Image (cartoon, rainbow, N blue to C red):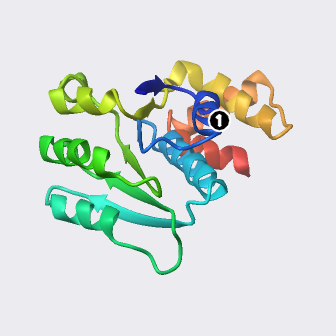
């Protein structure tokens, strides 16, 4: 089942019918990770995953919190999305906890992990490779400064707006390659 994707279009297609048990969204661009996670959360709601439990993972990760989050029953909703937010580099302990938990996950629980870009040192570990064979992994694209003007123009076009090349260059220069700042400038 493992699948690696890189665009919102691919993500929409991959989760359109049903969410896989484990989704991992990573990338250097926080805005794109947030937007992809928002897309997953919206699709989860459409598929009846009405409850969401957010678990922040930091350096003091304790696998019992993850097990508790996936095994506790809800009084309000029968289907849940466990939203794991990694504030640190993924560890072997987290990876092994996810790997061990996945076969025991019931059909009414899904796990979404969001993190910064995953380095080769992480993606080549045995635990990550085992997870990658079972999960949907989206690595959001990196938008460099040279591509930012095109990215801004595409975002404006999606809002049925356009800008001249000098305006695009000005927004690119003023936002200094920061997608979040560029997004805010476009929204104004």
Q: In the picture provided, is 67 more to the left or to the right than 19?
A: left
Q: Is residue 70 above or below residue 160?
A: below
Q: Is residue 74 left or right of residue 128?
A: right
From the viewer's side, name the closer residue of 172 and 123: 123
Q: Please give left or right for residue 95 compared with residue 10 in the image.
A: left
Q: Residues within 10 Å of mark 1 (few under 14, many from 20)?
A: many
- Give left or right: position of 166 versus 116: right
Taking the spot 44% from the left edge, 24% from the top edge, the residue there is: 4
The image quadrant where one finds the N terminus is: top left
Query: What percent of the width, then of the height, locates residue 117?
Result: 34, 33
Quadrant position of residue 106: bottom left
Residue at 48% x, 41% y: name it. 20
Question: Horizontal and vertical percent for residue 62?
Answer: 15, 61
Identify the residue at horizontal 81%, vertical 41% (top origin). 159
Residue reaching furthest to the bottom: 75
Q: Mark yes or no: residue 97 visible.
A: yes
x and y, in percent, of residue 9 in the image: 64, 30
SS at mark 1 in the image: helix
Which residue has dot 1 on it?
171
Residue 2, by quadrant, is top left
Q: Is residue 108 above or below residue 119?
A: below
Residue at the right extreme? Answer: 160
| Residue situated in front as seen by the camera: 14 or 169 | 14
Q: Place residue 134 in its image quadrant.
A: top left
Q: Position of residue 112 (x, y in %)?
A: 42, 49
Image point 53% across, 72% down: which residue?
A: 77
**How many marks overall?**
1
Tell me if residue 61 can be seen.
Answer: no
């Amino acid at each position: 089942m493992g699948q690696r994707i890189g665009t919102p279009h691919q993500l929409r297609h991959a989760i359109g019918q049903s969410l896989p048990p484990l989704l991992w969204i990573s990338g250097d661009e926080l805005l794109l990770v947030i937007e992809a996670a928002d897309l997953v959360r919206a699709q989860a709601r459409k598929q009846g995953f009405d409850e969401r439990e957010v678990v922040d993972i930091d350096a003091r990760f304790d696998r019992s919190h993850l097990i508790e989050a996936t095994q506790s029953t809800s009084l309000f909703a029968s289907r849940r999305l466990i939203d794991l937010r990694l504030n640190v580099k993924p560890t072997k302990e987290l990876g092994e906890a996810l790997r061990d938990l996945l076969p025991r996950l019931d059909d009414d629980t899904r796990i979404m992990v969001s993190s910064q870009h995953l380095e080769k040192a992480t993606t080549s570990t045995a635990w990550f490779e085992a997870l990658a064979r079972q999960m949907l992994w989206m690595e959001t694209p990196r938008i460099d400064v040279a591509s930012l003007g095109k990215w801004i123009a595409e975002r404006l076009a999606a809002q049925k707006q356009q800008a001249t090349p000098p305006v695009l260059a000005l927004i690119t220069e003023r936002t200094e390659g920061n997608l979040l700042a560029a997004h805010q400038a476009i929204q104004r």
